[in-house]
Image (tube, rainbow, N blue to C red):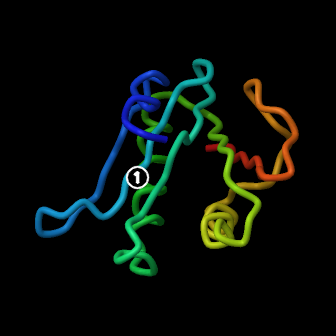
């Protein structure tokens, strides 16, 4: 998602950087008072494999919990290029689920959720 899409979704965007360089972002939107959606998560290629995504995800989970969310859901890609992201989400307690919040079954997408 680009900046305009994130603003239109009223997303909270968190970033992590090092030496003034942005390494990754994650965005959270509210679906209902207790359910949030991870709208976007991205780590720059040069920072992949360094734990940036995991730090962002854990921080986002803590933030969502502090804001009263009880569940987080997300949509990610089904292609091999998204395998690392799916592995990260699974390792952090997310499980594959059915489409949510207006999403529809799509062979290019994987839907995941986690109670927090």
Q: Residue furthest left?
A: 19
- Residue receiving disc 1: 59
Other-residue count near label 1 (Cα within 10 Å), few / some / many at <14 / 14–19 / ≥20: some
x 41%, y 73%: residue: 45
Quadrant of the rendering where the C terminus is positioned? top right
Q: Position of residue 40 (x, y in %)?
A: 51, 45
x 72%, y 72%: residue: 80
Give the image quarter of residue 34. Answer: top right
Give the image quarter of residue 48. Answer: bottom left
Look at the picture and state if 16 lies above or below 98: below
Q: Position of residue 10 (x, y in %)?
A: 43, 22
Look at the picture and state if 7 lies above or below 95: above
Q: Nearer the viewer, residue 81 or 33?
A: 81
x 62%, y 34%: residue: 70
Q: Position of residue 79 (x, y in %)?
A: 74, 65
Q: Position of residue 115 (x, y in %)?
A: 68, 43
Q: How many numbered callouts? A: 1
Q: Nearer the viewer, residue 67 or 26?
A: 26
Q: Say left or right for 23 vs 9.
A: left
Question: Helix, strand or loop at disc 1?
Answer: helix
Q: Say left or right for 84 vs 52.
A: right
């Amino acid at each position: 998602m680009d900046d305009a899409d994130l603003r239109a979704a009223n997303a909270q965007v968190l970033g992590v950087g090092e030496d003034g360089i942005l390494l990754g972002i994650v965005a959270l939107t509210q679906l209902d008072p207790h359910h949030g959606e991870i709208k976007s998560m991205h780590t720059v290629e040069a920072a992949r494999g360094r734990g940036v995504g995991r730090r962002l995800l854990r921080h986002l989970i803590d933030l969502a919990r502090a804001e009263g969310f009880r569940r987080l859901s997300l949509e990610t890609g089904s292609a091999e290029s998204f395998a690392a992201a799916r592995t990260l989400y699974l390792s952090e307690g997310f499980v594959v689920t059915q489409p949510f919040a207006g999403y529809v079954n799509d062979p290019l997408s994987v839907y995941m959720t986690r109670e927090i």
